[in-house]
Image: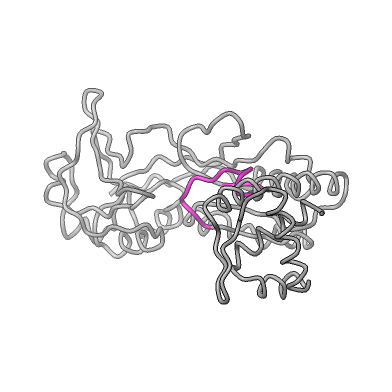
């Protein structure tokens, strides 16, 4: 028995929940898959799948074994890619994970140039706010916001991610410009929903963080929805500089100078980072991508445009 092939067959069947669907996609007879799984289960001494006439599902131990198989096969694929791609021309699928709004505002304008420069690289772009594990999730490079990331990946700072208070000139004309914490109780905020919680505003006073008394106009995890809402005058908003550079330049938004510090998070000195694994940098498609984005992405210079 080719155990690694059997493991791949098992993972594929678990994904499709069907022997016949897997057989069609893998272009092998159903009998081949069945014999391979029987041999694998016989060697392990455990049933990995529950079979019925119409459905295939994982057993409890099958689910555990699946996680190990996926990790092993991913490591093998990465090793093959590193060896096969070493000193060859950049090609293959480049898996990028990025914050949705950051990708739309900062990455998408660059991707066309990148693909023209490297036409044999196929971009697989995942838009997500979730934390990713580059090794476990099979991601080549990722763009994430936050504090300085853990040391086991290379983190290149590309932009500031601390949010600034802003609004549309029309909103401030109608409701006034807040100058004190007490003034905010007469205003409304546009809030961002992060994975697991809403980033409600807090104020920093004497080294402590306290909630801000302000009404809510909108809550969303959609960056474009939030940007449209603040530009159309629905409320005050906290946005990072890279998110509103063009709107500030056009005058669609203005910065609202305010003391004390207001934030949606108690973590200060936030940044956007390009993350990648040092060991993967030798792979041509990853090396050229890292070098391209490091050169092309420069920190945002926000116009000084206060209301």
Q: Is residue 54 left or right of residue 171?
A: right
Q: Is residue 55 left or right of residue 193?
A: right
Q: Looking at the picture, how far across and down is residue 56, in whole percent? A: 57, 67
**Segment tinted magenta in the rendering:** 127-142
Q: Is residue 211 left or right of residue 223?
A: left
The question of residue 93 being in magenta is answered with no
- The image quarter in which residue 115 lies: bottom right
Residue 77 versus residue 93 in the image, above or below: above
Q: Looking at the picture, how far across and down is residue 23, in whole percent? A: 72, 72
Residue nearest the viewer, comparing 58 with 237? 58
Image point (60%, 63%), residue name? 15
* Outermost residue toward the right in this view: 87
Image point (69%, 55%), residue name? 94
Q: Looking at the picture, how far across and down is residue 104, in whole percent? A: 51, 59
| Location of the N terminus (image quadrant) | bottom right
Residue 273 versus residue 15 in the image, above or below: above
Residue 42 versus residue 209 in the image, above or below: below
Residue nearest the viewer, comparing 100 with 232? 100
Image point (64%, 64%), residue name? 13
Image point (65%, 58%), residue name? 11
Q: Looking at the picture, how far across and down is residue 228, in whole percent? A: 35, 64
The question of residue 140 being in magenta is answered with yes
Residue nearest the viewer, comparing 203 with 120? 120
Residue nearest the viewer, comparing 304 with 225? 225
Q: How is the image coloured?
A: one colour
- The image quarter in which residue 203 lies: top left
Q: Main secondary structure of the magenta part?
A: loop
Q: Is residue 251 left or right of residue 96?
A: left
């Amino acid at each position: 028995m080719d155990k690694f092939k059997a493991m791949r067959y098992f993972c594929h069947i678990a994904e499709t929940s069907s022997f016949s669907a897997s057989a069609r996609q893998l272009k092998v007879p159903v009998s081949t898959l069945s014999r391979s799984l029987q041999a694998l289960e016989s060697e392990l001494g455990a049933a990995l799948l529950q079979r019925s006439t119409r459905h295939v599902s994982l057993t409890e131990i099958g689910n555990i074994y699946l996680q190990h198989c996926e990790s092993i096969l991913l490591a093998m694929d990465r090793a093959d890619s590193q060896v096969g791609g070493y000193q060859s021309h950049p090609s293959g699928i480049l898996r990028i994970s990025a914050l949705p709004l950051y990708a739309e505002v900062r990455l998408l304008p660059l991707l066309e140039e990148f693909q023209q420069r490297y036409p044999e690289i196929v971009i697989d772009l995942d838009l997500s706010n979730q934390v990713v594990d580059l090794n476990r999730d099979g991601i080549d490079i990722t763009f994430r916001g936050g504090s300085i990331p853990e040391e086991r990946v290379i983190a290149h700072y590309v932009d500031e991610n601390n949010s600034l208070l802003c609004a549309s000139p029309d909103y401030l004309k109608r409701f006034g410009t807040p100058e004190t914490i007490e003034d905010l109780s007469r205003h409304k905020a546009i809030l961002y929903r992060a994975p697991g919680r809403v980033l409600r505003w807090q104020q920093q006073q004497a080294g402590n963080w306290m909630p801000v008394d302000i009404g809510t106009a909108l809550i969303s995890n959609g960056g474009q929805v939030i940007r449209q809402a603040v530009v159309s005058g629905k409320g005050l908003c906290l946005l990072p500089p890279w998110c509103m550079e063009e709107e500030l330049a056009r005058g669609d938004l203005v910065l609202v100078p305010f003391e004390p510090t207001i934030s949606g998070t108690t973590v200060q000195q936030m940044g956007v980072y390009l993350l990648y694994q040092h060991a993967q940098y030798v792979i041509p498609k990853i090396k050229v991508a890292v070098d391209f984005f490091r050169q092309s992405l420069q920190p945002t210079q926000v116009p000084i445009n206060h209301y």
